[in-house]
Every structure is written in C-alpha cells, then in structure tokens.
Amino acid sequence: MIPPLPRTSPRTTHRSTLPAARRFQSLRQGAAAALIAGACLVMPAQASETRIAGLTTSLAPADGFAEFGDTGTDRSFHFEISFLETVLSYGPSDDARPVFLLANAYIIASQQNHGIAFFDRQLVQFGARMSDITRSSYLAAQSLLRATYADRVPLLKRISWVNATFRTLETAETLSGGKNPLVKWSAGLIYAQVPGIFGKREAAIDALNWLVDHPETEPTPGFFREAYRYLAELLTEDGDAQLVQMLRQKSGYHGQPPAVPFTGWFASSSDSGLLFAPTPWIEEVVPDRVFAIRGFGFSDFHFVVSANGANLISIDAGTQPFSAEAALAFLAEHRPDLPPLTHVLVTHAHWDHIGGQSHFRSLSPQPLFIGHDNFAHTIAKNTSRVPRYQQFRSRHWEDAWVASYQPDVAIRGATEMEIGGSIIRFVPTQGGETEDALLIEFPALGTLFMGDALMPFFGEPWEEEGSVDGAIESIDAALAMNPERILHGHYGITIIYDAHQLPAFRDALAWLAEETRRHINVGYAAADVVKLNLIPPGIERHPEVFLGYLAAYEAAIGRIADSMTGIWQEDVTGQAPSGLDVVGSVEYGRMLVEYLDLSPREIATGLRNMLNGGDNALALKMAVAAVNADPANAAVRELRNEAADRLRSANQYFNPFKFATYTELRDTEHLPIPRHDNGDTDDMATALKNAE
C-alpha cells in the first residue's frame, strides 16, 4: 500500500445539499476532472451499471466485467474482493494501493484464479490507457497471484507457468525503469521462494538488496518486513550470523514468520500493546510548526509550536505514561531546539489519548490540560471492564492512568482562545467514537485535529459506544471549517480521510447508513446486510474514498444494527437468528470429535479444505474448537495458526482490533520494528555491502 499521490485537482471547498442518494446519482451525470485528487483513477468511459441488492440499488461491475464483483455461492465471501472488483472495473487505477490490496485479498481467500482473470481483463481492456509505471504495478500484482497459484497448476505445465511468471516480472521491471519498489518487492519475494532449479537466488538477493538500499521508497512503514525476512533466509547459508540476525530483527518476526506475507502498519505485543505504526518515526507536517510522532502507543502524538515560538502544544496525551515519555524524548532528540511543553489539548478522553497524561503532568512546569467538559462517561467506560486481550492496551495497563483525568480548562461550547500568538478554535461534536469529541483547529496553519471523531470502527468493538450519525456530524463540522489538512488520532485514519476525501466519503457513509437501517427494520441481521455488497452508485467516480469506504463498511453496519436490535437478532431467512442459544467452541469440538466421529487426520483435512476454499473465519472457528478438544493435535494447531494469519492479513490495514485479536488467537505477537532512521538504514546497507 502506498501513500496518497500528490493532489492533481483543487480541494473541494463546499458540499452539495442534495440528499445522499440523489447526490450520488448526480455525480454519475456530472463532468468531473480526468484525475481525482489524492488517489488517481482514469475516468470511467461508461455510465454506472447497477444491480438490485436486497431492498436497494447498488453499484454493479462495469460492462465487460459482469462475472466479477459478486461472489455468490461459488466462492467464499470477502467484501473487499467484491468491492474492489466492482469499482476497479470502471478504469485503471494509477494508485497502486487498491490494486495490491485486491491482490492480497485474492491470495488469502485462495481465489488467485479469479484474480488472474480479473487483472488479465483489466490489462486487455485498459492497458492502452495505463502509464508504464501503472502497468508495471498491475503486472507485479498479477505475478504474485500467478506465483502463489503455481502449486495448483498441473505438474506437466508448472515449469512453463513459472517461467511465464518470470517473464511477466521482467516486463514489469522494464516498464518501470527498475525504479518501482512494488515490482522489486514482488520479484524479490517470488524469486526467493522458487526451487533452486530455476536459478533465481542471486536475482532475489539483488531485488531485495535494492529495497534495503532505497528505504525512502518503502510505501508505508512495515511494508518491507518480508524483504528483510527473505533476505535473512537467503543469506543464512553464507554464514554471516550477525547480518542475518540484523535482518530478522528488521522484519520484526524473530523466528516466528507468519504463514502469509504482511505489509501493513500495525504491530501488537503484550509489552507495547497495539501500535498503529510499527516503528518510531517523525513527520514534520508543517515545517518548524506541526510535528507528528508515530509508533509510540496506539495513538499518534501531534505537537504544535505556537506562533511566537514560546510554547509547545501537544494534541492528546498518548496511550501509556511510558509511551508518552518515549515520544516526547524522541521529539527532543530530533528537534532539541523546540520550546517546553506548556499545553495539552485533548480531542477526547479515550484510553489511548489520555493514558499518558500522568507523565505530562509530572513535567515542570506542569502543562495546562484543555478538553471537553463531557468526559466523565468516556472515562467510566474506559475503566468499567478489564480487557481480556493484552495486546490492546498492553499487559502493563492500569486504569488509574485514565481514571484521574480531568481537564484544567473545560470546553462547553464552540470556543476560541489564543496561546502564544496562535488562535485556536475548539468545536465540540457528538463524535463517531465517543460523546466528548472536540475538533481543534489552528486556522493560521490550515490544520484541523479531529482525534477519533471519524474513527471508521465507530468505537472500540468491545464497548457499547460509537455512533455513525456522530461521525457524520463531525464530518459536517470539519467541512464547515474548510481546513487545508486534517490530522486524525491514528496514522492510517489520516491517510484515508484527509480534507479532500471527506466530502464524497460523507455522502457514501450517509447512503450506507440509510440503506442499513432500511434492511435492519425488516429483519435483516448485520451479517445479512454486510453480504449484500452495498456500494453506492457514483462512488466509482470518487476513487479518493475507495479505501475509506472499505475501511468503514462492516463496522458501520454493525454499529447501526447494534443500536436497532436487542440481545437477539433476526436474520433474513428466519432460520438462523442469533442470541437464542449458547452454542460455542466446546459444542463445536464435541460435534467434530464425538458426533461426526472424525479422526485427527480427517479434521485436519477438513480444515485444509476450508482454507483452500477461502473460508478462513470458518476454518479458525473449527480449528479453535478442535484444538480445545484435542490440544495434542499439532497439525490442527498449525492450521489454526494459518487461518489466524490469513485473517490478520485481511485486516492489516483497516481493522487494528481484529488484527490484535487474531494475533492473540494465534498465540503470537507481531512485534514492532527497530527504529527506522537514516543511521540504522545506513548500517544495514553497509553490512550488506560488506557481505557481498
């Protein structure tokens, strides 16, 4: 996944007042710019195709792609595949993110054959409209699908299949001029894993070395984990144990490589808790004025230098006291010339945004805390239950870190104040995550801090919180301010919901909320609605919101359904209501072992068939039950781990809560990566040069 491309069209400065459904209809008929800001998609050459989905009209694949976009019953359900097949069928994407996300989804769903056919169709139908660099990314993604599908090709045809895959990679390398990191990454991983008879060891080392030598090309922190992993494996036989150990540390796997590749930005461990960035790094968002510090706790730190240069202002207080201390020290290490911390502006009182407050309050002089007056309910939820999973808040977590929080200055309504010559505007909203959301704007810097008012999970899934309507209210308030940039409380959220992405996303989210309520009202369950593949017609002309809509889809439906139903939920068939019974893992284990009388080998075969069919969640549920029934069954335990890895991979960009949960179900950790700064990179490159 790569960061957004530079803007190629003006930022939207106002929003249509049409109802959401009508607004998307009008977008289909309007003449828009050829390239959309942020994430580029060549303009579709045809009108939207639609289909009936439940009670509504949803976007269908473009003409020529009718067999894609709806998994039906012939393959396992994965919304990300259905969605991306549908929207990408309208034109080639110059943004490689959705292309590689789709390739990854095909791989973990064991649907490479469908993916190969889809990309073949794209290259044939849209190839003439693609730039060389775009075509090289498509070919690299297709090569990954071909390589991971090779073991299903008949043996007599397999060698020619693999050689054809090599030729595809070579074409991609030529088209990119040898400078596309996605092509290098794909080639390195593929060449590293083919049998030695193909003679690709040196080519693999060359491609992976190129990535190490060009760390600035890493699409997002964590993307090169696999490059370090496979380079370590290739160089093990050379006998340089120190270099191999260095590479393994850079991968973050430490001898426990997962069953599928990982490129995402999450990390989780019982010591650090859940991280939205896998390695510490600093971004100077506005030169000398606004700094983002990432990789210290679940939330990001943002620091602003006041207009007169006398004050350092923190936006929020981090996740834990130790992460707050480390983040402040990291900032001082990179910018020792900054003034002392004098103010902490709190966007909301969630545990990951105030958990480090005690460290900030221990400073001398003590900074002044400013926050919403409506914080008590959020604090109560933070401390009302002990989280079962330690990789969320960390095993060191103490409720006292948040229980004592209280702002020194409480904001009760829209407020403007001045700190060190900087005018700051505070706008309370209901918020999409908590009720005490506070938007904080620095107008002179063109910067708005939204905290988690637009968290696409709409609250922590384990808690009864979050509101889709609150998120829409917060978006409306943000759009009214017309900021140049928006910084959210977490790196990934900042990437997919920036200022130019919000108008179209707001409309897509409102459409989804309206259609979800319509279905829940007549007896659809949340799972039924998710499987309808609800895609607003017109969204294909707004690729800047593809990833944002994908990230919010399932959680938005779940939160709305939760607010409309009781402890029981109907389903659309009337045959599978939920909440009526207490059947769980123990009963599933008894079913497998006692009632179906399956041997350990037969259970393993069944689980393998589920994985080969892409039913990863079903495989994990059954594998957990089988392991509980027979803890000594090592084969089933390995299959459980593979199922969990596939589900972690499916969520490695969009759902940190699922990611951490599946990581713990696998009995492993996804460790942070050692600091990724110039000195460390130079040391690595030097070590590799010496090894050569």
Image (tube, rainbow, N blue to C red):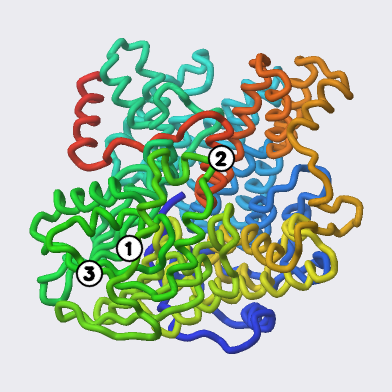
Amino acid type, label 3: Leu
> Which residue is disc 3 drawn over?
368
Viewer-nearest of labels 3 and 2?
3
Q: In the image, is 186 to the left or to the right of 609?
A: left
Cα separation, mark 1 vs mark 2, equals: 29 Å
Q: Which of the two discs, 1 and 3, sits closer to the camera?
A: 3
Residue 402 or residue 315, whichever sits in front: 402
**Amino acid type, residue under disc 1 in the picture:** Asp
Pointer 1 local density, CA inside 10 Å: few below 14, some 14–19, many at least 20: many
Q: Residues within 10 Å of mark 3 (few under 14, many from 20)?
A: some
Q: Residue at x 54, y 56 (%)?
A: 460
Q: Tell me residue 662's x, y (percent).
A: 57, 38
In the displayed structure, 77 sits above or below 7; it is above
Per the rendering, the mark at residue 316 is 1
Q: Position of residue 635 (x, y in %)?
A: 66, 17
| Pointer 3 or 2: first along the chain | 3
Placement of 295 over or under 683, stated as above or below: below
Which of the numbered marks, if any, corresponds to residue 20?
Answer: none
Q: Observer-nearest residue: 36 or 418?
A: 418
Residue 271, can we see it?
Answer: yes
| Residue at x-position 46% and y-position 32% | 669
